[in-house]
Image (cartoon, coloured by chain):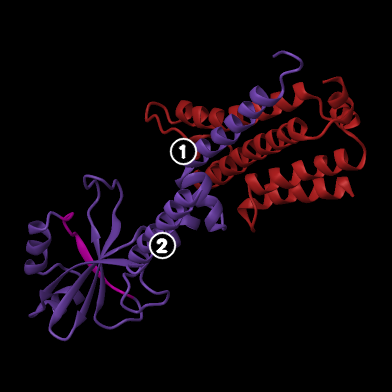
Amino acid sequence: MIPFIQLFALYVIFHGSLGPGGGFQGGAVFASSFILYIVVFNIARGKKRVPESVNMALSSAGLYIYAGVGLLSILFSLGAAQYLNYGFIPFTSHFEENRALGIDLIEIGVGMTVMAIMISIFFDLAWDKGKEKEG
Amino acid sequence: MIRFKATALILIILLGGLFIYVAEDIPAFGDPNAPSIRAVKLFDLHAGPSENILNQGAIPGALSDALKKGKFPPPSRAEKVPGEERQWNIFIPKNEAHYAREEKYYWVVKEGDQLRIYRHAFVVRWFEKGLKETAVPNMVTHGLADYRGYDTLGETVVIFTAGVSVILLLRRRGKL
């Protein structure tokens, strides 16, 4: 079940430009697949699968991708300083298709951040019986 | 306790009154007289002979004077709305103070002997040029990630901040 949910989440993220969907929704679906894993097994195995360090790294990497695409477009706009105007990044030879690809890139960034943050909030709020006894 | 309950009751009545007062001004859904989303009305003008001038693609003098008097951006040329009688789109010239490109800006409708001057809303431009400018067919996506890119960056930062603050508050690992 879980790989299918993840496949669907990736579909939602990448088809955000064609049909309904986008980074926020796809990230939420992706996070829900991991939350399902944690509910079915337990928190310890879930933490082995998605360690906290990886989680935090993913969430900040998503933001860095977003801001970095914006900074790249400053670099490639050659003095015009058009932050987040993706058309200047030379993915292809067409200005408009560059914008479409830039949108896809930042959707990936948004999806990573949303997924990692939702998982980390779930880990923090989840009831851990073993730790409850320790205090 | 009774005093507390009485105060709460008075507060509820006051808030209810305030709500009714505010809610009365909200136009009913589907009200034909409610302001439209497509365009914003600016003013009326006596038509005179302007229909022929507009049909030839030029701007009548009275209209450009009235626009100048109202401190609206100056018009450059007119174009008939395709498929409509007595309706024209008026463009503003290149390198106007706020728009670098030539933009479709005014919408003129002739009713009787009055010219009604409207301003196109941003939505119209979004509909017509979004696909051409970004090559993304989904209107929501190119609005969210391209035209409103700064806004979405801010939203992502808000989500990140929420996660970090939950970590700071709840994940103390035996400290404190």
Nearest the eye: A90 or B151: B151
- Say whether residue B96 is magenta: no
State the hue of chain B: purple
Q: Colour of chain A?
A: red
Q: What element carries label 2?
A: helix
Q: Percent x, y for residue B134?
A: 50, 50
Which secondary structure lies at badge 1? helix
Sequence-wise, the earlier of marks 1 and 2 is 2
Quadrant of the rendered image containing residue B79: bottom left
Give the residue displayed 31% in from the left and 70% down from the top: B35
Q: Disc 1 or disc 2, which is closer to the eye?
A: 2
Vertical comparison of A82 with B66: above or below? above
Q: Any mark on residue B150, and which?
A: 1
Tell me if mark 2 has few (under 14), some (14-19) or many (20+) residues whose alpha carbon lies within 10 angstroms of its own. few
Q: Given contact means CB atoms under 8 Å apart, are the residues at marks 1 and 2 in contact?
A: no
Where are the magenta residues, as a range? B72-81
If the image is split into quadrants, where does the C terminus of chain A sit?
top right
Residue at image mark 2 = B16
Q: Which residue is drawn at 12% across and 76% down?
A: B50
- The quarter holding residue B118 reads bottom left
Question: Mark 2: which amino acid?
Answer: Gly
Residue type at numbered disc 1: Tyr
